[in-house]
Image: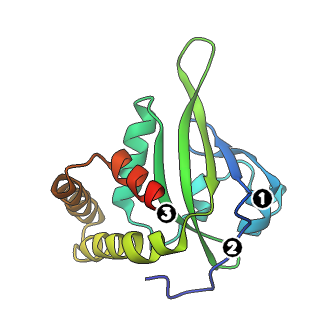
Amino acid sequence: MLSQGKEIFFGQDELIVSKTNLKGHLTYMNDVFLRVAGYREAEIIGKPHNVIRHPDMPRAVFKLLWEKIQAGSEIFAYVVNTTKSEDYYWVVAHVTPSFGSDGKIVGYHSTRRLPEKSTIKNKIIPLYKSLLDIEHQHRNAKDGLAASYTQLQSVLAQEKLEYEEFVANLMKAA
């Protein structure tokens, strides 16, 4: 896992912020986002947010994330992103739906900060590697995603936790 590129860091007191429309296309990125990801605003505005998705990020985690935010809930998640130069950076992301005056979801807002290194190394990388291994065991991507998602739910059930509680516990322990 994470065999390509080098790890990029940003300040403990910095926040990466982005906003997307309903389809996940970027409508706003702050300067920290642009600097860390290595893009100029003009080359990434309007692009799908997944342009920074790292290939070693399990699709099952994004499935869970999208289920939560499309249902109107917030979610915290550990995410590894890729930069324009194919380096990578870890974040703990807080993703929320943005609501219009009529109460309907009009887009999504994500604020990300630097996670604790030991949490990534000792908890997240082993979990994500196991999910990726399951995804890659299947020729059909849809089957791989379903199997990986089932495994993620199984891990959470063994811990007797919802995903949000799992992440919150990791954040508290850090």
Give the position of the N terminus as an image quadrant. bottom left
| Apparent side of residue 43 relative to residue 166 in the rendered image (left or right) | right
Amino acid of disc 3:
Ala
Amino acid of disc 1:
Val
Quarter of the figure with residue 5:
bottom right
Camera-nearest residue between 152 and 136: 152
In front: label 1 or label 3: 3
Q: Which tag, 2 or 3, sits closer to the chain's start? A: 2
Pinpoint residue 166: horizontal percent, then vertical percent.
Answer: 34, 53
Pinpoint residue 146: horizontal percent, then vertical percent.
Answer: 23, 57
Amino acid of disc 2:
Phe
Circle 3 packing at 10 Å, graded few (<14), some (14-19), many (20+), is few
Read off the residue under disc 3.
174
- Where disc 3 sits, the SS reads loop
Colouring chosen for the image of the structure:
rainbow
Label 3 near label 2: C-beta < 8 Å? no
Q: CA distance from mark 2 to mark 3?
A: 17 Å
Q: CA distance from mark 2 to mark 1?
A: 11 Å
Pinpoint residue 36: horizontal percent, then vertical percent.
Answer: 74, 67
| Apparent side of residue 120 relative to residue 155 in the rendered image (left or right) | right
Label 1 near label 2: C-beta < 8 Å? no
Q: Which tag, 1 or 3, sits closer to the chain's start? A: 1
* Residue 33 visible here: yes
Q: Taking 113 as reference, is 137 above or below it?
A: below
- Where disc 2 sits, the SS reads loop
Residue at image coords 67%, 53%: 47
Report the disc number at residue 32: 1
Pinpoint residue 99: horizontal percent, then vertical percent.
Answer: 58, 23
Residue at image coords 60%, 53%: 49
Read off the residue under disc 2.
9
